[in-house]
Image (cartoon, helix red, strand yellow):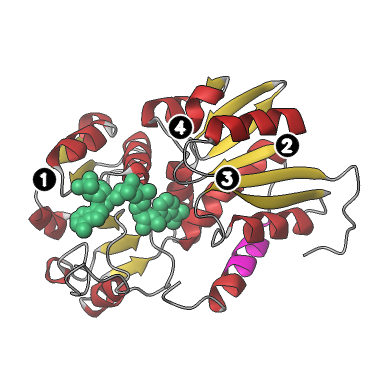
Amino acid sequence: MTDRPITAATRCAAVIGTPIRHSLSPVLFNAAFAASGLDWVFLAFEVPDGEAPTATAGVRSLGLDGLSVTMPHKTAIISALDQLTDDAAELGAVNCVARLGARLVGHNTDGAGLLDSLRIDEGIDIAGRSVVVVGAGGAARAVTRALGGAGAGSVVVVNRSPERAERAAALAGSVGAVAPPVSVADAEIVINATPLGMGIVTTTAGEPEPLPVDPGLLGPGQIYVDLIYHPPVTPMIAAARERGARTVNGLGMLIHQAAHAFRLWTNEEPSLEAMSGAALAALLHRPESD
Ligand code: NDP
């Protein structure tokens, strides 16, 4: 954190969601503001389900300069905004609100965050690659659309509910398709966009939760990407490594989607080093089961 005093001139951005107390956003953004020498502060607000429009009215009247949006408000906030980017409109989900004059514009930076994480942090160019996305929820949809837009050779969605899989695959355009889990074996890149695989949650019957992907389908030459970032090495990541696959966790996506928000709010380039250093330090002190 900076030693800069908070004054009446300090600008304010925030995240809304519930539950929100575990959000890494304040850590990420306050580190980035401090590293850039910006007189900004970032706070987290616990906003109950159904109250996104009221909170957005508060953003307008209090003059907040930026808003991050997380579960369960990503869709419900849309009706309270003035404008959406193409990504946010097509996904029906907003994770970042920025001002355009007096107008509040809803963006979705999750897909761009994943692409930047792969390209900048991992040196992985998605163009022409065969990708399987496991899951068809909000994160999977953002990722699937971004992969299609980035020129992936194929984007195959594997999901428990087939109708949701079809809708997600359509977001990738002509390269999108739906396939059974066994198709993981043929993919160059496999992305887990389900909450499965942390090895912490147990089913109601007391069984350990299933892995999102059968590790036996993975092998050398493949890249397994998990959108989960805590713990950094999930049982699924460990299993993928054991099978010889290269692995990437979701921390890079988290940082890069926040970096996009930072640019939209401040028109400045954030320090990615400051953001990742602050995130890693915060996660180091977080119990694995948290
Ligand atoms: P959603 O609830 O929107 O979607 C969850 C998906 O997982 C659905 O497709 C669902 O299938 C599937 N799923 C859930 N439980 C099971 C199960 N027991 N068996 C099979 N499939 C299951 O979640 P999100 O898309 O918002 O988030 C998904 C993950 O991505 C979370 O772990 C989240 O933390 C992470 N994430 C990471 C980000 C980052 O920056 N790193 C950003 C956003 C999310 P069905 O359609 O059949 O219900």
* SS category of the residue bearing label 2: loop
Q: Which labelled disc corresponds to residue 16?
A: 3
Q: Secondary structure at mark 4?
A: helix
Residue identifier under label 4: 76
Q: Can you give x and y, in whole percent of width and height, for residue 157 in the image?
A: 20, 45
Whether residue 166 is visible = yes
Secondary element under disc 3, as helix, strand or loop, is: strand
| Mark 2 Cα shell of 10 Å, populated few (<14), some (14-19), many (≥20) | some
Residue 28 locus on image (x, y percent) = 63, 58
4 vs 1, front mark: 4
Q: Quadrant of the N terminus?
A: bottom right
Establish if 284 lies above or below 277: below
Within the image, what quadrant is residue 188 found in? bottom left
Residue span colored magenta: 271-279
Q: Is residue 1 left or right of residue 212?
A: right
Task: Name the residue carrying label 2.
Answer: 64
Lower position in the chain sequence, tag 3 or tag 2: 3
Magenta stretch containing residue 68, yes or no?
A: no
Q: Residues within 10 Å of mark 4 (few under 14, many from 20)?
A: some
Q: Which residue is mark 1?
A: 179
Q: Residue placed at 22% from the left, 62% from the top?
A: 212
Q: Earlier in the sequence, mark 3 or mark 4?
A: 3
